[in-house]
Image (tube, grey):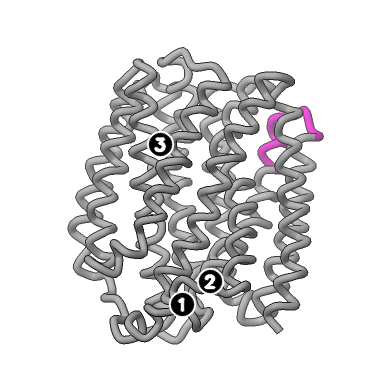
Amino acid sequence: MYGLLMARLPAVKAAAELSDSLIGLCLFCTGALGLVGLGGSPALIRKVGSRMVLCVTAVIAAAGLCLIGFSTALPIVLLGFGAMGIGISMLDVAMNTQGVLYEHYSKSQSMNLFHAFYSLGAVLASLIGSVCATVGLTAGLNFFWASVPFVLLSLLLNKYLLPERRVDEEKTAKTRHKIPLVVLVCAVMALLAYAAEGSVGEWGALYLTTVKEASLGVGALVYGIFSGVTFVARLVGDPLRKEFGEIPVIIFGSVISFIGMVGVLSFSSVALVLVSYSVMGLGLAPIVPTLFSMAGKNGKIPAAAATSTVAFMAYGGLLVVPPSIGWMAQHTNLHEALFIVLGLIALMFSLALLLRKLHK
């Protein structure tokens, strides 16, 4: 759902006649309402379970997407972005809680595999968005026909999800407010990684179409290509974690993603920019799933509380960084504004070195 919105963002911008700064405001609404959702996720999951939260928030996210697609009035568009924010954020916590539970029950490292299929969904969304943009299908109809199977599958497959570990949750309930330092560091690093990934989804298509002069169809492919590489990389992410350890995977991924972003900003060829985004995706791919897994198995606070802390900070990055890029692009240009991403990746590398010390 999110990938489809990002793929059709140029069409949404054109239909509603939004400037770069207004796109930034829309993304701010997504981040702000996302933080609200994340703040309430742990208590809601403890009360009704992650399975129920997943079902309800899937419907909310789909409704928000359709509002964005069918409306050209700014207030309604903002409402849609806000609904997407609260829906996707709570959905994110519920899904990552399920991932931590699966790792616990199966005694295996599987978080990268779970996140790989998120990336696969983004690939499919980008391809669908590109085809729909090429044939001239409106964003509203595109969003509607994607939302129907998304909601139906969320409801039908819900019975296969795992129940919460009630005994463990009760034992750690009294200390859930004491967030371990390792969880906080994971959370800040997830903020930086999410912001870097978000720069591709939220500004990649606009960057190619407005700065590199690519067509709308090619622009819609940016996030799909990025996510396709991410999908493949995450399939081998868990074996790499097992072979080399979690911290080396994060450090090496930070270096690769930095090189990729340098290429995005340096090359004038659309093809080479797409290749550079692929390299960036290769590096970022294992970082976020590994951070969620490390935080979730901290042993001091419940998995839902740990994953919501990481997700809360991550969405804080989406709240601050994309609007900042939009504001800077409005006052300079989008090319210069994207240099922010290089700084984020460099800081993430530095924190990975700190996390290595904490993890020993």
**Farthest top residue in view:** 17
Task: Give the CA separation, mark 1 to mark 3.
Answer: 40 Å
Residue 180, percent from left and from top: 57, 74
Q: Earlier in the sequence, mark 1 or mark 2?
A: 2
Mark 1 nearby-residue class (10 Å; few <14, some 14–19, many ≥20): many
Mark 2 nearby-residue class (10 Å; few <14, some 14–19, many ≥20): some
Task: Say if mark 2 contacts mark 3, CB within 8 Å.
Answer: no
Q: Earlier in the sequence, mark 1 or mark 3?
A: 3
Q: Is the residue 85 above or below the residue 354 in the image?
A: above
Q: Which residue lies at the image location 77% right of the left edge and 35% below the top edge?
A: 265
Residue 205: quarter of image:
top right
Residue 286, percent from left and from top: 60, 64
- Specify start and end residues of the magenta stretch as a single range: 266-276
Main SS class of the magenta portion in the image: helix
Q: Which residue lies at the image location 71% right of the left edge and 84% below the top edge?
A: 360
Amino acid type indicated by mark 2: Ile
Residue with the mark numbered 2: 179
Task: Give the CA separation, mark 2 to mark 3.
Answer: 41 Å
- Mark 2 vs mark 3: give the one in front: 2
Q: Is the residue 96 above or below the residue 131 in the image?
A: below
Residue nearest the observer in this picture, 76 or 100? 76
Amino acid type indicated by mark 3: Ile
Residue with the mark numbered 3: 128
Q: Is the residue 37 above or below the residue 299 in the image?
A: above
Q: Earlier in the sequence, mark 2 or mark 3?
A: 3
Residue 295, percent from left and from top: 54, 72
Residue 345 inside the magenta-drawn segment: no
User: At numbered mark 2, what does the secondary structure look like: helix, strand or loop?
Assistant: loop
Image-based side of 232 in relation to 176, left or right: right
Location of the N terminus (image quadrant): top left
Amino acid type indicated by mark 1: Ile
